[in-house]
Amino acid sequence: MIILDASTLILLAKTDLIELFISNYPGQVLIPEEVRSEILEVEKADAAVLKQLIENKKIKVTKIKNNNFSNKLMEDFNIEKGEAEALGLTLQEKAAVIATDDRNAMKACKFLKIEFITSISILIRSFEKGLINSEEALIKLNKLQSFGRYSKAIIADAAGQLQGRKGEDI
């Protein structure tokens, strides 16, 4: 089981990775209600893709049980409600991992000892599994760079991992 926050969902949708990721993820994909609200509040192409995935039950929306915990996370780690609910849902559901690209949410994960992944790590893993080739992966990395807030070092490291290595078979 994996929990995704809004930043990662939107980045994966903007780079045409979300459907590939979900169709190849072996477990359940969940988001809290606040994340659904955040990703669907603007009518854009990526919102339409995400809405369809929710309607088709590829992404399950789950209610967070402890709003007080989410509020405390917002206060303690200076994160938005969607990230706080995603973290709370990760603990509530005992999920294996959370996907977040929010810097403060990552700090919270480290403090709470929650395993996390990012859009870039999903991209690299998709390449390693042979789901996309190096050229496609580099194009998607450029899109992530333009939409996300990544340091030059993170982008350079990811590009290095995507060049010169052949994707493995699934």
Image (cartoon, helix red, strand yellow):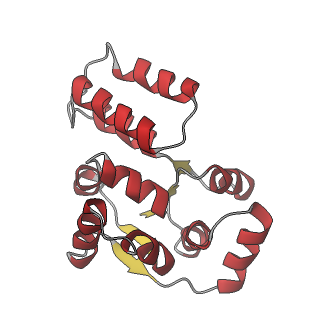
Is residue 23 rendered to the left or right of residue 90? left
Q: Farthest residue in the top direction?
A: 164
Identified at 27% across, 35% down, the residue is 129
Is residue 128 rendered to the left or right of residue 66? left
Q: Nearer the viewer, residue 11 or 169?
A: 11
Tell me where residue 152 sits by quadrant: top right
Decide: is 112 above or below 12: below
- The image position of residue 122, as x and y in percent, is 39, 43
Identified at 40% across, 69% down, the residue is 39
Quarter of the rendering occupied by the N terminus: bottom left
- The image position of residue 101, as x and y in percent, is 53, 50
Identified at 20% across, 31% down, the residue is 169
Tell me where residue 25 sits by quadrant: bottom left
Q: Nearer the viewer, residue 92 or 120?
A: 120
Quarter of the rendering occupied by the C terminus: top left
- The image position of residue 77, as x and y in percent, is 75, 61
Q: Nearer the viewer, residue 93 or 164?
A: 164
Decide: is 134 above or below 22: above
Q: Farthest residue in the right direction?
A: 76
Tell me where residue 167 sits by quadrant: top left
Identified at 55% across, 73% down, the residue is 89
Label count reads 0
Q: Nearer the viewer, residue 12 or 109?
A: 12
- The image position of residue 148, as x and y in percent, is 48, 44
Is residue 99 rendered to the left or right of residue 165? right
